[in-house]
Image: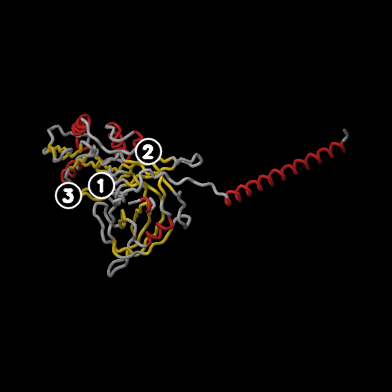
Amino acid sequence: MNLADTQIAVKKLLIGIAVLTVVYYSGKFLLIQGVGIYRKLFPVEVPIPEAKWGKLPTLKMTSVTIDGSPQYTLDTVSGNLPAFTDRIKVFPIIEPSTTLLSEQGIQKLAGDLGFTGSYTKVSTSGRRWVDGTNERTFDADTITKNFTLETPSSKIASISSSTASITDSDAINLVSTFIKSKTLMNSTDIDNLYTHTLLVQIILGNLREIKPVPAPPKIIKVDVYRNLVYKPAAANRKATTYKILGPNPKDSLINFYVTNNNNIFKFPIINFTYWDVNYNDGSEYYLSNITTVWQAIQQNQGIIAYAKTKSGDFFIPQNNIAIGKIEIRDIYLAYYEPKELAKFLQPIYVFEGQFETKAQLGKLSEQGEIIIYFPAVRGDFVN
């Protein structure tokens, strides 16, 4: 084969490759378009959610009171409402029960926290230990396994004044180690914990928030939260992580006040309310449309779970704040965990943003943070 024949052969090969390429991509494009048109004409029927528990009980949530009817605006990154799936699982909360071992477990926990005397029965399942010498009280329930440890602020002030400061990381590690060593949660929740800290000081015998930080703190409040990692039934959908939030998203149902004291005052205050959830027995329910929910929020029908001005203090509740404008900057799904035992862990929409108070005579307007809840399960699936 001479040079001319080679050139002709190469040219034919290139033309053939070009033709095949055009045919391949054209065919692929037409196939995709055809499938799209077919699916529009004959959409795949998605099965309705199982909703095996029937109508769910209404969530019992209390709202912070504000003054007036603020103007709501949407200020998300995209400028639009986020897209959500049309369904999500609801999970049953395991009914607590008591055994001889659980009674012994509560007594051991009291001993580990430095309560060595006998207890007093305050109810059928309630037990109370009082450490009069150190002004501490430990209350626990043998059925729910929930408990509180209280120490008066005056005593905490006396103890913390003679202890060294403590860091965020040390406080978090102490709390995490305590929860894991006492097996206070199931293994799934322990693997999905996250925390938030608040720096605390005592002023005139009262707990107060430290801001700005003048020096390393002597007391740190560690709020312990847990995530729910949810894998939808559809194989092509990724797992999603949801927060589990209580009545006040800034005050977890599980929180520890931590000092650098190596004795019984390491945790002068503990609030521990935990409901064990059966994550293997979830059932899908329809969600309310986010557009409809947003309209309800704009009509002040949401549950204001948290509202605090920048000058406010975490330990001083703020009610009847005169809010003029609310900017919602983030919207997401979470699960609501009530203070009292409920049958189910149900989803809620969470609206986070900033507010601005109304300017009043002799008082300038002020900004603050606001968090609003709204039940997420569609209304026809709720009593």
Residue sitting at x 30%, y 47%: 246
Query: Disc 2 designates what residue?
Result: 281
* Residue 304: x %, y % from top left: 32, 56
Q: Gap in Å between the C-alphas at discs 1 and 3? A: 12 Å
Q: Which mark is residue 205?
A: 3
Q: Earlier in the sequence, mark 1 or mark 3?
A: 1
Could you tell whether 165 is left or right of 41 in the image?
left
- Secondary structure beneath dot 1 equals strand
Q: Earlier in the sequence, mark 3 or mark 2?
A: 3
| Amino acid type, callout 2 | Asp
Q: Gap in Å between the C-alphas at discs 1 and 2? A: 40 Å
* Residue 163: x %, y % from top left: 21, 39
| Amino acid type, callout 3 | Gly
Could you tell whether 38 is left or right of 79 in the image?
right
Could you tell whether 9 is left or right of 174 in the image?
right
Query: Disc 1 designates what residue?
Result: 200
Could you tell whether 9 is left or right of 74 in the image?
right
Outermost residue, bottom side: 361
Q: Nearer the viewer, mark 3 or mark 2?
A: 2
Q: Earlier in the sequence, mark 1 or mark 2?
A: 1
